[in-house]
Amino acid sequence: MTDRLTVPPSCSCRARVGVRRLLPYFAGNRRGFALVAVIWSLALITLLGMAVMVGARYRTRVAANYASAATAETAAESAVNLGLSMVLNRVAGPDVRFPLRCQLPGGEHIFVTVEEETGKIDLNTASIAVLTRFFTALTRDPSAGARIAGKIIEPRKPKKDVNSGPENAPPGATFTTIMQLDQIDGITPRIFRAASRFVTVRSGRPEPDMEAASPALRRLLNLDQKTTSAARGVPAAGSITIRADVTAPDGARFIREALVSLADAGRPYVIREWRHGDVDQAAQPQLSSRDEIQAPRRPCFRTVDAAASEGA
């Protein structure tokens, strides 16, 4: 006779009753877990949505800044051409003169100046004394100023060619553009930006013409401001730099410079170089007042038309 393990009826009933009591507990836990999962999912979706919106706003702002900068750059080139046309047509009469302040049709405020290259320091022909005084004023260190001046005039010294024997100046030894100034040992980016407004390669003078020099250069060279004339006409020949400082209606700013040779080789003008100008408050104190920059100005083309009619 085989023995069988039998479970008392009372035990089976108690197990079933225990399972029934635990079912609501497990069901409640599942509902709580589902609620937590839903909350976390909503939070994650919200964060992703915010990231997408912030990224879209940033991209829109960057695109707007690029568009504004491009518009200001185009307006600056137009302002340079406007200044050049005024120089060529000699319309700088009593109502229109340099520096020129006016407003373009697009609402951009322009500030156009004409700088004579004879009023600047020529990197190829300036004397060691002028260069030393100039760079000492920029670096505020006499030894550094003298060292930079010596490096600038070093290529002028004739070098002996071991093959040919006689002394000669090797080609490319002098400066062909002021942008080569940053290749001189001791010229930091700060000094280069400060010096670029006052140096040239188109003057040919041992020292700048103080009648044509800017007030900022005269201050750097420690010259008496009262000994210079207050106003000069636009030169009919020679080299000039036309500088256009443009401020767009949305605040974007761009500065464009053009080095122009007038009456060169039988042509009315030759544009030697285009440059992206740097904001220099010391060299242009007229723009130091924000209220003056935002002041209403006359339309540029109406100004030119009025001056042309008066000249006719």
Image (cartoon, helix red, strand yellow):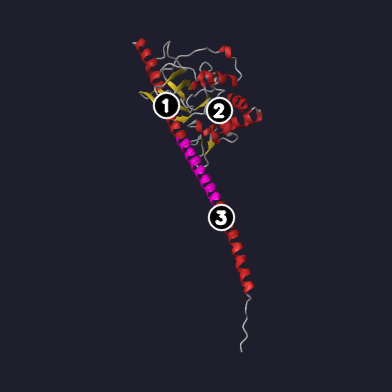
Query: What residue is drawn where x is 54% and y is 25%?
Result: 280
**Between discs 3 and 1, the one toward the N terminus:** 3
Where is residue 215 drawn, in percent x and y? 55, 18
Query: What residue is drawn where x is 49% and y is 17%?
Result: 295
The amino acid type found where label 1 is placed reads: Ala
**Between discs 2 and 1, the one toward the N terminus:** 1
Where is residue 202 drawn, in percent x and y? 47, 26
In terms of depth relative to the viewer, which is nearer, 40 or 254? 40
Mark 3, residue position = 31
Q: Residue furthest front?
A: 10
Dot 1: few (<14), some (14–19), or many (≥20) neighbours within 10 Å? many
Q: CA distance from mark 2 to mark 3?
A: 75 Å
In terms of depth relative to the viewer, which is nearer, 284 or 134? 284
Q: Which mark is residue 75?
A: 1
Front position among marks 2 and 3: 3
Asked if residue 50 is positioned above or below residue 18 in the image, the reply reads above
The amino acid type found where label 2 is placed reads: Ala
